[in-house]
Image (cartoon, rainbow, N blue to C red):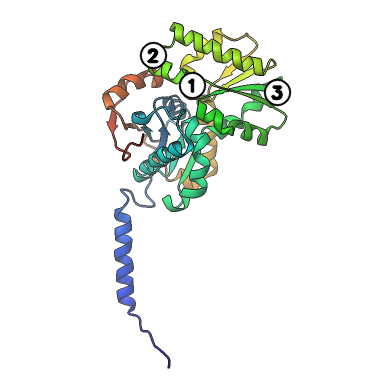
Amino acid sequence: MRIMFTFDSNKINSLLAEEAILMIGLFPFKMNEAGPIGVFDSGYGGLTVLKGLVKNLPKYDFLYLGDNARAPYGPRSFDRIYEFTLQGVKHLFDQGCSLVILACNTASAEALKTIQQKDLHYLGVNKKVLGVLRPTTESVYDFTQTKEIGILGTSGTIRSKSYLIEIKKFFPQILVHQQACPMWVPLIENAELSSAGAIYFVEKYLESLLQKGPNIDAIFLACTHYPLLYNLIRRSLPKHINVYGQADMVGPKLATYLSRHSRIDVKCLKNSKVRFITTDDPENFERQAKLFYGKTLNAQKVNLGVHST
């Protein structure tokens, strides 16, 4: 006995249309609508990267999200860093961003690859998440003569060994030495930039790094907070060792990336607008952010969900 099924094409089309409307309603922006470039950081340090991005891409719109309520990320576990970073990326996508830059080295080192491989396929068609790690690692060869360099970062960044892996991939002839600096971010965020404590911990970590690599001639600051300690770091090192931040590397690299990826570039608004959101108190964010961004700004508070401990 043959069982025959009949389909009402009008009803099917109607159901599909209703489902499409429901799906679109989940997002505040249409799939093909342009939005700002999202910049995510665990706190304030990413503002130094944003400043470099605005300098190199002055026509573009940016939306900066600082997860200040849960900073710092450096001492946290991989699972927690991944969870928090994914929440930030989702929020920026929901705000219309097709491209998100992880301006946090810890997030770039610990969470970026997992998000790219595991989550992007369901987060949205043609969405992109990039970090600050690769633009830095692609550039290090040009800044060293001895081919021996140092990396200073948070405990999470150093623990991940991401800089070691990426630099070896691009430049296997370069010898890389790492040093975690867990006290630097708290000192910076408490405006202790030239205190006795700052001097002690800068000298302590630099001495430890140079003991590992006596032929180091270039040191890279693999945390976006660290440029605020540049003068103190510079005074604590021999003159032949140069120190480099990431702001001047990431901006030009992103400009090149957008020139090569027109499908992403066309989804980036170009009205020269920059907005700021934070998971913590906006007034406190505005007050502290001026130290990193160099100018007064206005911020709004957002909630990325239940704050895990």
Q: Distance between the residues labelled 1 and 2?
A: 16 Å
Q: Tell me where residue 175 sits by quadrant.
A: top right
Q: Quadrant of the N terminus?
A: bottom left
Q: Quadrant of the C terminus?
A: top left
**Residue 90 horizontal/vertical position (percent):** 38, 44
Toward the top, the furthest residue is 196
Closer to the chain start, of discs 2 and 3, is 3
User: To which residue does mark 3 refer?
Assistant: 147
Closer to the chain start, of discs 3 and 1, is 3
Structural crowding at the residue carrying mark 1, measured as other residues with C-alpha within 10 Å and reported as few (<14), some (14–19) or many (≥20): some
Query: Up-down: is 192 above or below 67?
Result: above
User: To which residue does mark 2 refer?
Assistant: 191
Closer to the chain start, of discs 1 and 2, is 1
Structural crowding at the residue carrying mark 2, measured as other residues with C-alpha within 10 Å and reported as few (<14), some (14–19) or many (≥20): some
User: To which residue does mark 1 refer?
Assistant: 182
Give whichever of 293, 203 is nearer the camera. 203
Of helix, strand and loop, which one carries label 3? loop
Of helix, strand and loop, which one carries label 2? loop
Of helix, strand and loop, which one carries label 1? loop
The residue mark sitting in front, 2 or 3, is 2
Identity, as a three-letter code, of the amino acid under mark 3: Lys
Query: Up-down: is 206 above or below 298?
Result: above
